[in-house]
Amino acid sequence: MPTNASTNPLGEAWPRVRTPWPARTAPLYGQDFASDPISYYESLRKTFGPVAPVALEETGAFRGYLVLDHAYQLEILQNRGQVWTRDSRWYRDFAEGALPPHPLIPQLAYRRSRLYAEGMEHTRLSHPGNKALAELNLLRTRDLIEDLAEQLIASFSPEGGPAEWNQVDILDQYALQLPLLVMMRLMGMDEGSALATGNAIHEMLSGGPGAQRAAAELDSRMRALVEEKQRAPGPDLVSWMHHFNRHSQSELDTHELSEDVWLQIVAGRGGSTTWICNTVLELLSNPELNADVVAGRCQMEEAMNRVMWVNAPIQNLIGRWATQDTMLGGYPVNRGDMAIICLGATGADPTMLSGSFDVSRTNRSHLAWGAGAHGCPAPDLGTLIVRTGLEVLWNRLPGLRLAVPKERLTWDLPYMARTPTALPVTFPFPPMPLTNGHQWTAQQSFISNPPRPISTEPKAKPSEPQGRLPLWRSLVAWWPKR
């Protein structure tokens, strides 16, 4: 919710605006921006330099400084000078109620979670979730991803039997579903809860008339999951979060734990979905790269890395605010002004990619995982979901091709993520049927028993570091072995 218009988060009166907003502002909306953002960012760099004042809608009130160059982006993300914050209560225009309606604005509203916290509070809110993620057995997790990917691909065959050529929207029927299913399975959800949660997330992120209702439903479901795992822990991320939270110096309450579960599911879905979709598009529209992947001259992860430069899955990180008057790329910035980290522009940054060799395959200096305190806590998991999903797709559907020319694809506005509205592909012959019989609803016994339920009675803090729970060392031990 917006803060009191008269004070900032420190309880101090907002100072008088010393420097008016630049007279020349570029639109960060419209068809030119949607259809070819890379060229659009390059034109902004030529016109404004490394930082461009932009408006995100027609009135010009929803605005920020678009940071185009890698060095300035890293400076803000690392925040060594303690100038910038993720706490949206510092967004002065938002606090003063000066913003017009826009689908992005509800997503900037402050929540009591690590996403908007700084310093010791960020460390406290991050501790259980980060410790739980560190317990993931990535080999077992890869088995889980493969099995879910196989099930999704098996569902591509149309009713009535396959045709000589079959068509599917790889965005809607694969890229949107796989990361979400993986994250919800790791959180310990059953199939019914996963389906309802997925529908709520989709409706919330669409920004439509049902977005607020869906957000409230999602909050309720996350709280119910957290409470369920407190009563009956299992080999899943939420139960591990309870375990580490119980033995931390400053415990999170149920709301704070629910917020972190919410964040991990939504964040895991967003970037991974777009990364899968854009890598499929790059491979199917770049015959040389595709041939290198098929022949083994290029690993799938190299193709994924190239996409980070030429068609970044997350185009813009909207949400860094100045906590004091400062300078940015030659512009005087007032306290409470917003900076937007333009990851999509780094591929055209002349300081990052040069030479005749395609260094976009191997240059991993992109900032897709963020940097500093708010960097992604689980880049290995995100990479594993995308790489495994793509490798299974390429192995199961040889001959995959675009169903329409790339030029005919339509695109959503890339405020944050960039994907086409649909990615129709065709493939010859049906995929081979599943032979292992694994389904989401299969009732499999746990390989390891879950730990004892966590008591709700307060207990004294342990005097010595606690060991790991002995009976569920593998987070995904419940997933059947091959």
Image (tube, rainbow, N blue to C red):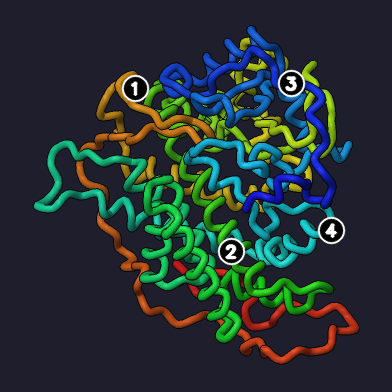
Label pair 4/3, CB-CB below 8 angstroms: no
- Residue named by callout 3: 20
Residue placed most toward the observer, 117 or 212: 212
Label 2 secondary element: helix
Q: Tell me the CA gap for discs 2 and 1.
A: 37 Å
Counting residues from the start of the chain, the first of labels 2 and 1 encountered is 2
**In the rendered structure, which disc, 1 or 4, sits on the residue that comes first in sequence?**
4
The quarter of the picture where residue 359 lies is top right
Could you tell which of marks 4 and 3 lies nearer the N-terminus? 3
The image quarter in which residue 132 lies: bottom right
Which mark is first along the chain, 3 or 2? 3
Residue type highlighted by circle 1: Lys
Write the residue at 65% across / 31% down.
340
Q: Which residue is mark 2?
A: 261
Label 2 environment density (alpha carbons within 10 Å; few <14, some 14–19, many ≥20): many
Using the image, determine if residue 249 lies above or below residue 430.
below
Q: Nearer the viewer, mark 1 or mark 4?
A: 4
Report x, y in % for residue 199: 37, 58
Q: Residue at x 60, y 68 (%)?
A: 258
Q: Mark 3 or mark 1: name the one nearer the start of the chain.
A: 3
Lateral position of residue 417 relative to residue 78, left or right? left
Please name the residue that numbered disc 1 is placed on.
Answer: 406
Q: CA distance from mark 4 to mark 3?
A: 34 Å
Residue 120 circle label: 4
